[in-house]
């Protein structure tokens, strides 16, 4: 085959795949089996592998591409993404209609009523038929560029056929969401690996779209409904309803439940119709959106600084019911937070059985005066766990019991304390089983003890099998113990034990940071290691001595105090010391203060060190790393292909150094 016939073959396959993609993901009406679809994709992949020069970003094989972002760029929306004003009653809709009539000075107004899907608003921009950018709403003026993640959503077309329409540049807006089943699956997976659960599908969607690595987003089956089309050539259609039809024709996924209403009564009919029916949908709908249909009228009405005057949201009230508090239990979260939870007499609410309600913290219980045995009113919005509205005091019998938070952790019985200014009680035990996995992960992480090969999966197994009950048990592990674990061979067991042994040398500041003491981050750990010779000395230091250290605030001071006051923690430290874990600072005195107070900015690709290594070196020597160049910057460390920070440093006359110069000033060489 010659090159041009290969190109034709590839294009034909792409068109075929796009067509079936649309049938499956957008129209929910597949024409071929999954197997046949996979065969087509496999053929295309094979050809693209043979002829990589023919790969284009809009090819259906390229939905996940590129490197994970370090952070999202923010971009300004061409037209601000306004939010809708909310209403909760028909009276308010009547007011909206009156305002609209007055604003237009005419009576002939049609409304389009749509479902208000509870997800995350996004914008997609297409140029010459290709998706060129996707952003979040952000603050309405600027959003985050999440193109890579939006491309992973199968119902987002990468390429649109615009041959028949003059739409060279256009923007569509819509809502990204999870359906109920997928949301449940995600939370089950998260539970299995000990990750915190998403409170509702909206949070899950927002979290997934903001993941830095599209390879992880692609594992989350997000969906999208588009509800707005705007182009330079809006003359193509005169009404919102026509624009929605056009969106559908172009291959976008548009919610099928759209009503064109000739008058307010028809709008009310929609409100009544969806009141209950919305619960039969497999995604969250928290209300309806009422929009003036004619673009000419929308234009006349315009917008306030926050909301368009031509549209309004009608929100259904959250459903409420009453039940009895049978007991109040305390859960310990993976970060050591103690949360009181009401055990309820089971009731049906918004179509599901409710047996628990979160009480948040002890202040909330006091404020609402919730007692065991009380009858309460509860409400369920979009959240899985309902909230308590109020106590039905008139139903009290006098036998209700006042609840108080425990003095010890209900899981590990270590002391609990309430950090100043915070509402939540926390367990101080580093070996608390509720927190152990999370704590071990932090302990092993790169900036802490840097134990390579000790990932979350392995930690899960070690904790589950009871092989590790606290940090010090790590240093007792033998190669043979771990070799038998899942996904572990002799070689990886050996690597792991070596990495654990190596971490013994990490030293004071890393070890202190690794303990995961609340508020003690890298910088605080460094400052403390710079002012005390060893962890032992810090342990016996007075609160006053710790508080006198420059930059160490009362919160850090308090956390340190409670941490060392817990006997179980001291026992773990003693064991660690016995097992040969270094408790002292590894920096020499000279190095420690060498960069005291100096501010650094990094730009470009470094070759000798990673960015994290450089940051650590700077922090450990008393300096700081900031993200933008200002007149307070002392040094700009420049690598290959530096960015605009380099130019800025030149104009501000800041010291520009390369890696060799950095080694000299930081005392490395
Ligand atoms: S129209 C200026 N239509 O609800 C018009 N919004 O504040 C803006 N939403 O952030 C949006 N379904 O993310 C519109 N059919 C729908 C919608 C919808 C959900 C979201 C949107 C917006 C919020 C309203």
Image (tube, rainbow, N blue to C red):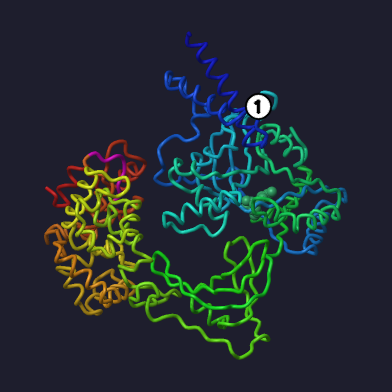
Q: Establish whether ligand 1 lies closer than 8 Å to the Cβ of label 1.
A: no
Q: Is residue 356 magenta?
A: no
From the viewer's side, name the closer residue of 661 and 89.
89
Q: Residue 455, position in %: x, y?
A: 32, 51
Task: Tell which of 84 and 392 is nearer to you.
Answer: 392
Q: Is residue 606 magenta?
A: yes
In the rendered view, would you say 663 is above or below 377?
A: above
Asked whether, in this view, residue 533 is left or right of residue 116, the answer is: left
Relative horizontal placement of residue 489, taking residue 185 as reference (left or right): left
Residue to which mark 1 is pinned: 162
Q: Is residue 622 visible?
A: yes
Residue 591: x percent and y percent? 14, 57
- Residue drawn 64% across the image and 89% down it: 397
* Percent coordinates x, y for residue 376 in the rendering: 63, 78
Look at the image and tell me whether residue 82 can be seen. Answer: no
Tell me where residue 52 sits by quadrant.
Answer: top left
Q: Which quadrant of the figure has residue 535? A: bottom left
| Label 1 SS | loop
Residue 499, percent across and down? Answer: 20, 50
Residues shaded magenta: 601-607
Q: Is residue 117 left or right of residue 429?
A: right
Which of the 4 image quarters holds residue 569? Answer: bottom left
């Amino acid at each position: 085959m010659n090159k041009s016939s290969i190109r034709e073959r590839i294009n034909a396959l792409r068109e075929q795949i796009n067509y079936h993609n649309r049938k499956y993901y957008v129209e929910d009406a597949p024409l071929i089996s999954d197997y046949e679809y996979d065969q087509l994709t496999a053929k295309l992949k094979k050809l693209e592998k043979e002829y990589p020069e023919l790969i284009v970003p809009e090819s259906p094989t390229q939905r996940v591409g590129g490197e994970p972002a370090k952070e999202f760029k923010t971009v300004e929306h061409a037209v601000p993404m306004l939010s809708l004003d909310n209403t909760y009653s028909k009276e308010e809709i009547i007011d909206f209609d009156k305002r609209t009539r007055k604003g237009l000075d005419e009576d002939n107004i049609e409304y389009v009523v749509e479902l208000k899907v509870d997800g995350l608003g996004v914008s997609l921009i297409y140029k010459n038929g290709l998706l060129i950018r996707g952003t979040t709403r952000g603050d309405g003026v600027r959003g985050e560029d999440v193109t890579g993640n939006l491309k992973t959503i199968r119902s987002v077309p990468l390429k649109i056929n615009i041959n028949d329409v003059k739409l060279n540049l256009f923007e569509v807006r819509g809502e990204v969401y999870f359906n109920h089943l997928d949301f449940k699956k995600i939370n089950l997976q998260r539970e299995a690996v000990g990750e915190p659960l998403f409170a509702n599908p909206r949070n899950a969607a927002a979290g997934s779209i903001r993941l830095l690595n599209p390879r992880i987003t692609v594992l989350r089956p997000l969906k999208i409904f588009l509800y707005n089309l705007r182009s330079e050539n809006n003359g193509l259609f005169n009404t919102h309803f026509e624009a929605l039809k056009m969106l559908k024709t172009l291959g976008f996924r548009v919610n099928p439940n759209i009503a064109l209403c000739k008058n307010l009564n028809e709008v009310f009919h929609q409100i009544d119709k969806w009141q209950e029916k919305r619960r039969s949908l497999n995604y969250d709908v928290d209300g309806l959106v009422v929009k003036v249909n004619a673009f000419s009228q929308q234009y006349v009405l315009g917008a306030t600084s926050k909301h368009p005057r031509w549209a309004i949201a009608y929100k259904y009230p959250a459903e409420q019911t009453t039940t009895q508090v049978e007991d109040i239990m305390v859960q310990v979260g993976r970060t050591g937070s103690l949360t009181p939870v009401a055990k309820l007499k089971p009731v049906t609410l918004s179509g599901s059985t409710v047996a628990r309600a979160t009480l948040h913290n002890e202040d909330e219980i006091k404020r609402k005066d919730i007692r065991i045995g009380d009858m309460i009113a509860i409400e369920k919005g979009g959240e899985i766990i309902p909230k308590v509205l109020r106590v039905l005091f008139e139903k009290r019998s006098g036998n209700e019991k006042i609840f108080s938070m425990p003095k010890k952790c209900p899981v590990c019985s270590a002391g609990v304390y309430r950090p100043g200014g915070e509402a939540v009680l926390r367990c101080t035990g580093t070996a608390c089983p509720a927190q152990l996995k999370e704590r071990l992960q932090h302990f092993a992480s790169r900036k802490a003890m840097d134990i390579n090969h000790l990932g979350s999966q392995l930690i899960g197994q070690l904790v589950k099998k009871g092989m590790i009950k606290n940090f010090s048990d790590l240093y007792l592990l033998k190669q043979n113990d771990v070799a038998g674990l899942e996904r572990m061979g002799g070689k990886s067991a050996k690597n792991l034990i070596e990495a654990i042994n190596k971490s013994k040398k990490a030293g004071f500041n890393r070890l202190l940071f690794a303990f995961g003491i609340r508020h003690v981050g890298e910088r605080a750990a460094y400052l403390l290691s710079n002012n005390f010779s060893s962890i032992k000395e810090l342990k016996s230091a007075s609160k006053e001595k710790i508080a006198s250290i420059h930059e160490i605030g009362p919160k850090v001071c308090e956390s340190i105090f409670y941490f060392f006051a817990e006997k179980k923690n001291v026992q773990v430290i003693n064991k660690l010391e016995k097992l040969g874990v270094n408790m002292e600072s590894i920096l020499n005195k000279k190095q420690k203060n060498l960069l005291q107070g100096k501010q650094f900015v990094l730009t470009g690709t470094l070759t000798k060190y990673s960015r994290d290594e450089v940051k650590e070196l700077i922090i450990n020597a008393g300096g700081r790393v900031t993200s933008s160049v200002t007149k307070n910057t002392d040094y700009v460390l420049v690598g290959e292909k530096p960015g605009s920070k380099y130019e800025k440093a030149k104009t501000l006359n800041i010291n520009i150094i390369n890696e060799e110069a950095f080694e000299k000033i930081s005392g490395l060489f």
